[in-house]
Amino acid sequence: MSRSDKVSQAIKREVSNIIHNEMKDPRLGFVTITKVELTDDLRFAKIFYSVLGEEAARKKSGEALESALGFIRKLVSERIKLRFSPEMVFKVDRSSEYSMHIEEILNELKGRKDDEKSC
């Protein structure tokens, strides 16, 4: 495991902890940090998150995360000892939505196949 992989796991753990235990923003929904992509020089981090709920909840949670970005970055840099605190960007991870959509399509197709067998 490379150094950037270890640091990205540490950032993921700390950001999750900060969001769930230290942020009090009412706009924040049920946010899950799914992945952190870190450049090899440890200067930039893309933090991917998913939100349970509708598009409106996702948008409000995104706004809350953006407004707390400085606070989150400060706490992460205090807790993870690095020479430079990485610039952070939050990105919505829609992979779980996509997989649920694919599962619905597969179930629909299976239902059609079962209906054809019964005829």
Image (cartoon, helix red, strand yellow):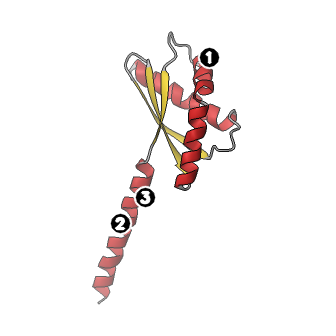
Dot 1: few (<14), some (14–19), or many (≥20) neighbours within 10 Å? few
Upstream in sequence: badge 3 or badge 2: 3
Element marked by disc 3:
helix
Give the amino acid type for the residue marked by disc 2 in the picture.
Ile
Q: Residue at x 33, y 72 (%)?
A: 110
Element marked by disc 1:
helix
- Front position in the image: 63 or 40: 63
Quadrant placement of the C terminus: bottom left
Residue at the spot of label 1 = 78
Give the amino acid type for the residue marked by disc 3 in the picture.
Met
Disc 3, disc 2: CB below 8 Å? Answer: no
- Front position in the image: 105 or 5: 105
Upstream in sequence: badge 2 or badge 1: 1
**Whether residue 42 is situated above or below residue 14 in the rendered picture:** above
Upstream in sequence: badge 1 or badge 3: 1
From the top left corner, tell me how far across and down residue 68 is, in percent. 61, 31
Dot 3: few (<14), some (14–19), or many (≥20) neighbours within 10 Å? few
For this view, does 32 lie left or right of residue 97? right
Q: Residue at x 62, y 35 (%)?
A: 19
Residue at the spot of label 3 = 100
Quadrant placement of the N terminus: top left
Dot 2: few (<14), some (14–19), or many (≥20) neighbours within 10 Å? few
Mark 3 and mark 2: span between their CA atoms? Answer: 9 Å
**Whether residue 95 is situated above or below residue 25 in the rendered picture:** below
Element marked by disc 2:
helix
For this view, does 55 lie left or right of residue 29? left
From the top left corner, tell me how far across and down residue 58 is, in percent. 54, 48
Give the amino acid type for the residue marked by disc 1 in the picture.
Glu
**Whether residue 50 is situated above or below residue 108 in the rendered picture:** above
Residue at the spot of label 2 = 105
Q: Residue at x 60, y 47 (%)?
A: 30
